[in-house]
Image (cartoon, rainbow, N blue to C red):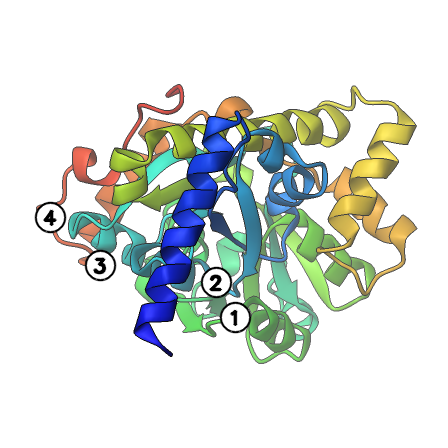
Amino acid sequence: MNVFLSRRQALIGMGALGSAAAFGLPARAATRNLAVLHLASHAPSFIAFERGYYKDAGLDIELKFFEAAQPMAVAIASGDADFGVTSMSGGLISLAQKDAIKVIGGALTEEKGVTGAIILASNKAYEAGLTDPSKLSGKSFGITTAGSSFHFMAHKIAVANKIKLSDIQLRPLQKLGAIVGALTTGQIDAWAIQPNVAKKMIREGAAKQIGLVSDYAPDYQVTTAFTSTKNAASEREMTAAFVKAYSRAIDDYNAAFADNKADDAERDALAKIVHKYVESDSPFDAAKQNLIDGAMRINSGLALSLGSCVEQLEWFKAEGMVKDAITNEQLFDTSFVKTI
């Protein structure tokens, strides 16, 4: 590339921006990447994108898809993504200790009386007697990675049933699709997953329901919103704009699915948006019903359940997956949302 020309082009571009400002025209926002998974818990990500809520907040957001929580945290730290909404992983916490990431809000929450994540057994294990989580000792349990939300859920289930976690064979399979395949074919005995995935497997005869995570971890802050420390500290206006846009979509989602307050037309419209990204291989009517039946609460305004998150942090420390030295202040920036 000709350095003179590229510099000249840059100066012309700067001049164009200056002219736009002079005439009161908004400068084009830099593109920001939002890390997402193909899960119904990410419905507000898709709703805000499709309904233009990010653009209304002055953001040019692109969706970047991942298969697990840990790579999302790495992407935020490296600058490959600007925001993410997923579970707190050991990798995320370690990156926070290196001053690379901040948790800025809370999203999906287990709530007593709401279906929430479903504990599944493979057909093979169920027929062999795994009909209840209290029988998980000696059985295999699928997780994406050590320190994932699946790992923490296995811990909570084990504690409640007085089972040593070491007596459950945790099988790290990296990707959600790999766990689905392993459970379907009986290569692993059990798993716990959000209801849109679990109910599809049950409906298709691929697995059996044996319990609910909410029975063992009520008020569990399943997913959090996070960004880079740089964004939280130096791009505060942009970060606050993201929280505002995402919160609009949360209100839409909760009204339609968690609280059943929206009319049929609105529910259908939102279900069609989510269907583009979740269960797109299923007929729309089946996917919509699955979304309705499996709806979980997403915290209004991305409010953060700090107590649950601190409990998770202490568990990571106790398990030796993160250093004891990390503080709450290193991990959380609660200045953008309410804490609950």
Q: Is residue 173 left or right of residue 291?
A: left
- Which residue: 42% across, 60% down? 9
Residue 303's x, y, as percent?
45, 25
* Number of numbered discs on residues: 4
**Left or right: where does residue 99 sit relative to residue 252?**
left
Q: Residue at x 52, y 70 (%)?
A: 175
Q: Image point 56% across, 33% down: which residue?
A: 246
Disc 2 crowd rating (10 Å Cα; few below 14, some 14-19, many 20+) is: many
Label 3, secondary structure: give it.
loop
Residue 68 disc label? 2
Residue bearing mark 4: 324
Label 4 or label 1, whichever comes before in sequence order: 1
Residue 87 is situated, as x and y percent measured from the top left of the image, at: 43, 48
Q: Which residue is mark 1?
A: 175
Amino acid carrying mark 2 in the image: Ala
Q: Nearer the viewer, mark 2 or mark 3?
A: 2
Residue 316: percent from left, percent from top: 25, 51
Dot 1 or dot 2: first in sequence order is 2
Circle 3 residue: 321
Q: Nearer the viewer, residue 63 or 108?
A: 63
| Mark-to-mark CA distance, 3 and 4 | 9 Å
First of labels 2, 3 by sequence position: 2
Q: Secondary structure at mark 4?
A: loop
Alpha carbon distance from label 1 to label 2: 6 Å
Q: Are marks 1 and 2 in contact (CB under 8 Å)?
A: yes
Mark-to-mark CA distance, 2 and 4: 25 Å
In the rendered structure, find residue 24 and report the number of the disc placed on it. Answer: none
| Nearer to us in this view, 235 or 67 | 235
